[in-house]
Amino acid sequence: MLTTVLAAVLLASLFACTVLAPGAAWAQGGAAPDARRPADVAQVLFGIISYVRWPVARPEVRVCMVGTPHHGAAIVDTPASSAGQRLRVKIQPASGAINECDVVYMGSLPDSERELLLAQVIGKPILSVSEPGTACSVGTMFCLRLVEAQIGFDVNLDAIARSGLRVHPNALQIARRKGPQP
């Protein structure tokens, strides 16, 4: 029962971030959506992570930021996700030891580096997430996207299936609720 309640809370928070939160900043007279964007991107990333189960339980989820992230500051500044998972975030080069990562968050990268990085990730239990505004390539599992003031994401089911990770169906359903495409 507790897991059902937790799943409902996580789903609501992930949905609110992808659909409602950007508009709320305007309604509250707060900062423009661009000022809130890093925090919103971090919340969506942590929401996705909370819906993923690795083949072997992780006491701490290791998030590696690769490339030049445009929205990564809030990810580095947040020590835990909304699900209470312990996170360790580190910035590393694309040529770094990816096998020490549970999540690879990709910022801007040259295509050649992105291809090399994904070649290391594909087929391994490493969650790959591409930052909004970067090229979303074939091997990336989740591609964050910005449409006007909304943050959403696309899902690559083939990449997820090859990884051995289990993603809760609710996260996949949220991805289907796409707003207008750019």
Image (tube, rainbow, N blue to C red):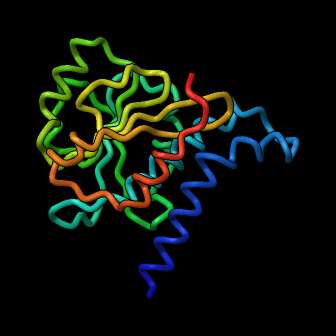
Above-or-below relation of 177 to 35:
below
The residue lying furthest to the right in this view is 29
Query: Residue 157, percent across and down?
Result: 27, 44
The residue lying furthest to the bottom in this view is 1
In the displayed structure, does residue 35 sit left or right of residue 102? right
Q: Number of callouts in the render?
A: 0
Which residue is painted at 47% across and 46% down in the image? 176
Q: Of residues 132 and 73, which is closer to you in this image?
A: 132
Query: Residue 84, percent across and down?
Result: 45, 67
Query: Residue 169, percent across and down?
Result: 37, 60
Quadrant assignment for the C terminus: top right
Q: Quadrant of residue 165?
A: bottom left
Above-or-below relation of 38 to 19:
above
Q: Quadrant of residue 103?
A: top left
In the displayed structure, does residue 96 sit left or right of residue 53? left
In the displayed structure, does residue 125 sit left or right of residue 32? left
Query: Residue 33, percent across and down?
Result: 71, 34
Quadrant assignment for the N terminus: bottom left
Which residue is painted at 68% across and 33% down in the image? 149
Which residue is painted at 61% across and 31% down in the image? 180
Above-or-below relation of 113 to 173:
above
Which residue is painted at 45% across and 52% down in the image? 46
